[in-house]
Image: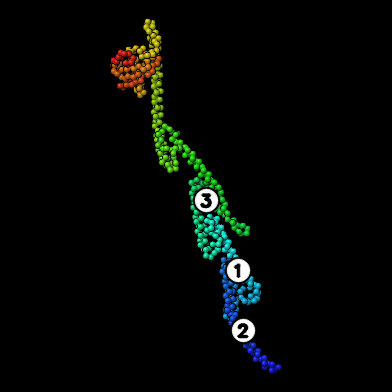
Amino acid sequence: MGKLAKILSPLVAVLAIAAAVFSFLIWKDLKPYQARAAKMAKGLSETAKKLDADTNTGKSGKLTYTEPQPGVKESGAYSYLKYKENPGDFEKNVNEVGSIASTVITQRNALAETITTVSKNLGIEDGTMLDEDLKASGTYEGKLALATSFSKAVKDREDDMLDGIKQISRRLTVSGVDALESAITIDKAEDDTMTAKYAGSEGIFDKMGKSIDDIKTARDTYEKWLRGLNGYVKKYNWTARTANIDVKSARTVLDAAKKDMEGINGKLVELESVKKELAEKLAELRTREDEIAKLKEESEGLTKKLAKANERIRELGGEDSASRPVLESVEQINPKIVGYVLLDNSEWNYVICDLSNKDIVKGVLVVISDETGKFLASGTVSKAEDKISLIEISRRSGDIPKGAKVFMGANASSESTDD
């Protein structure tokens, strides 16, 4: 037994030395692996934090790791101690990083698809905005810049259009256009999801359309009336040719039509003046008619006296004027007969004398003189009635007094009757 102990003791010592040397060699070779594992664990923890920074999954708070320090062991979800305690939880923590990454990728893809859809809804050209370009790291920045600038351009266009619609609505006196600015609303559901919708124009464009139709109808009516303007006053010498009016010539034609209207108004003013003058003449004529009526009344008195005289002539064997026939020709006129002026109208240039149709006929020339034989006027009998005659004066030296003598002219007889 003592011999066996002597033999095994050196052998055990050698094995112990060998084991120590082997352990040192193994520890020396494992140290790089431990450092790499620590870096990987730290990388997983930091990646989880970065992925979860704005994603807010709440998972990165559990995926911690603290590197080992001299005298201090490593700790956290990715430490060797956690792996040793529960390999299943350790593996779950490793997979959580991938889960967060999947969430981020899902968000990225959804955002890319949404940006593509929004761009298409705004009217961007097909093929210009693709999901793949927004997902790829080399092209997404350019596409995002394009989406931003395109949406701004659409917004600027919408603002211009809305401003134009407002201006048109003011000209058309259509109200309610301001409501278009608040026509897009956002509704929130019970589960806090929100949806935007367009409330519609509330008939504003229909009102504007109707107003424009009304204006067009009025414009067509005015145009039809204007084209026929020259024909409404045919006797006026128009300078505006309204039948051929168009957009280009409208201003020129309307200016000319305005001048024509001023000309027509001038004519109407002249007409009013003439009407006024005519009324004055008619009033004067009525006055003359009254005078003529008085003369007729006087003539009737003279006729009665003449009748008595004729009666006396018959008694004495003379000829009654009532028995004389109405003259039919110039040859029947007594060239020596003399009449007397009853009325002179120098403005209308006529004279009424006491010669009847039994003394004189229409068309005979007469000469009028005063009591001394001085020439006063000459004219032509225009009408011969039962008791008086109307003489149109062709030449006069002045006013003709009542009682002036009326002599027969050259065509009443071949003999001269001048004094």
Nearer the observer: mark 3 or 1; the answer is 1
Q: Which residue is mark 2?
A: 23
Q: Secondary structure at mark 1?
A: helix
List the single residue furthest toward the right.
Answer: 1
Image disc number at residue 178: 3
Q: In the rendered view, tell whether residue 228 sits above or below residue 168.
A: above
Q: Is residue 319 left or right of residue 158?
A: left
The quadrant holding residue 227 is top left
Gap in angstroms between the C-alphas marked 2 and 3: 86 Å
Say few, some or many: other residues with alpha carbon within 10 Å of mark 2 (under 14 / 14 to 19 / 20 or more). few
Gap in angstroms between the C-alphas marked 1 and 2: 37 Å
List the single residue furthest toward the bottom.
Answer: 2
Gap in angstroms between the C-alphas marked 3 and 1: 51 Å
Residue in front for this viewpoint, 5 or 275: 5
Nearer the observer: mark 2 or 3; the answer is 2
Residue 180 visible within the image: yes
Sequence-first disc among 3 and 1: 1
The quadrant holding residue 196 is bottom right
Determine the residue positioned at 39% across, 19% down. 292
Sequence-first disc among 2 and 3: 2
Q: Secondary structure at mark 2?
A: helix
Numbered label tally: 3
List x then y, in percent, for residue 158.
Answer: 51, 53
Amino acid of disc 3: Asp
Residue 299 visible within the image: no
Image disc number at residue 52: none
Quadrant including the N terminus: bottom right
Q: Which residue is mark 1?
A: 98
Quadrant including the C terminus: top left
Q: Secondary structure at mark 3?
A: helix
Amino acid of disc 1: Gly
